[in-house]
Amino acid sequence: MAETKKILVAGGAGFIGSHVAQELEKRGHQVRVFDNFVGGKQNLECFGSGIEVVEGDCCKAKDCRKGVKGCDAVFHLAAHAAEGQSVFIPAFNAETNILGSIRMLSEAINEGISDFVFTSSIATYGKPEKVPIKETAPLNADDPYAITKKAFEDYLRVYHELGQITPYIVRFFNVYGPRQRMDDPYRGVVPIFINKCLKGENPVIFGDGLQKRAFTYISDVVEPICDIVGNKKLVNNPINIGTEEVHTVKELAEMTIEQMGVDLEVEFVSKRTSDVKVTYCDTSKAKELLGYQAKVSMEKGLEKTIVWAKGMGPQEFRYFDYTEIPKLTHGIYTSKKI
Ligand SMILES: NC(=O)c1ccc[n+]([C@@H]2O[C@H](COP(=O)([O-])OP(=O)(O)OC[C@H]3O[C@@H](n4cnc5c(N)ncnc54)[C@H](O)[C@@H]3O)[C@@H](O)[C@H]2O)c1
């Protein structure tokens, strides 16, 4: 983005959104954060007076209208992003991630906004036929969260073909780092393990722990997403963004215990219905079209996250009392024993 813009960051009070808002402001843009604060307001403390904050729900057209007013671009990160939880709350998930995203898109179009950045996910690939996954791989989304991300990618394509929007779609992997919620028991295995260690409790793994993931430090997604607008080769052309360093969940748990210097052990419980065993991506397209290179190793990123987390102290996990399909709710959630 060469020229200065007024940018709406929807979901800007969240983990990634708050970092994106700050990076865009640092680059000289005028930034408005839009959020309904279901994930809390704690990240707002990081903003200076240069970032405008608007409370609003992306499921409400009126709120979205207020959010996009006067803006030139939208970074849409607002979502209910708990993949495993989406299996037992599929309607709620679709309301936020599909209908809420459509509302935001419609009001962006009505405001005459062209640039629309969307944070999609590696989850859209489902169980990959081959790893590392290239963007050309089939999108076999096989959980409700993944379906919502895939569906909204399709909405963006359709409105792009109608000449109404210039979409930029990034497919992130497992992002972690400071400001990620530690009190959310449903998602974010890195902050969950750290929080468990802070509480003096054993980290709990679903299944055998041999699930493989490319855990990506926050700064390795924030810069590329802020670089993407204006890159003609990436218009309506989804791109994988994240590290190519891969670890098992068991390795992550062991590294966390070691780095935190606690006398704890990894515990195993039955696997979750929707967990994909091995999933990580090829990022050669990002390297070629964006000059992308992930810079932070797992060891270093974990170290920085632990320093931040120790400053925050242990957090109580906040469980949803709400479920749509109780029999698909993993027992560890109902017993509140994550
Ligand atoms: N964190 C990851 O590993 C990862 C991986 C792939 C994709 N993503 C995507 O990146 C985006 C940001 O993820 P995150 O990890 O920062 O999540 P987050 O939960 O920290 O942030 C999401 C924000 O959206 C807000 N929000 C939720 N529902 C809303 C609504 N109806 N109206 C307005 N605001 C609402 C929440 O309050 C929160 O501040 C999401 O779209 C997520 O699906 C994240």
Image (cartoon, rainbow, N blue to C red):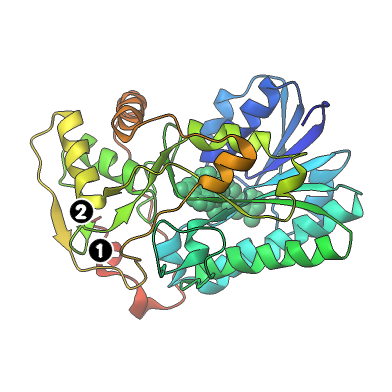
In the image, 39 versus 210, the foreground residue is: 210
> Looking at the picture, how far across and down is residue 91, in whole percent?
56, 73
Image point 59% across, 63% down: which residue? 149
Q: Is residue 52 left or right of residue 215?
A: right
Quadrant of res 126 = bottom left
Q: Secondary structure at mark 2?
A: strand
The image shows residue 197, relative to residue 320, as above or below, that is: above
Image point 15% across, 33% down: which residue? 258
Q: Determine whether label 2 and label 1 are within 8 Å by CB.
A: yes
Which numbered disc, 2 or 1, marks the residue closer to the eye?
2
Amino acid carrying mark 2 in the image: Val
The image shows residue 269, relative to residue 196, as above or below, that is: below
**Can I make out residue 39 in this image?**
no
The image shows residue 148, relative to residue 298, as above or below, that is: below
Image point 37% across, 70% down: which residue? 274
Amino acid carrying mark 1 in the image: Ile
Residues at marks 2 and 1, CA–CA distance in whole angstroms: 10 Å
> Looking at the picture, how far across and down is residue 96, in whole percent?
62, 62
Image point 44% across, 39% down: which residue? 180
The residue beneath circle 1 is 332
**Can I make out residue 164 in this image?**
yes
Label 2: how many residues lie within 10 Å, few (<14), some (14-19) or many (20+)?
A: many
Q: Is residue 298 left or right of residue 290?
A: left
In the image, 102 versus 140, the foreground residue is: 140
In the image, 196 versus 118, the foreground residue is: 118
Q: Which mark is residue 204?
A: 2
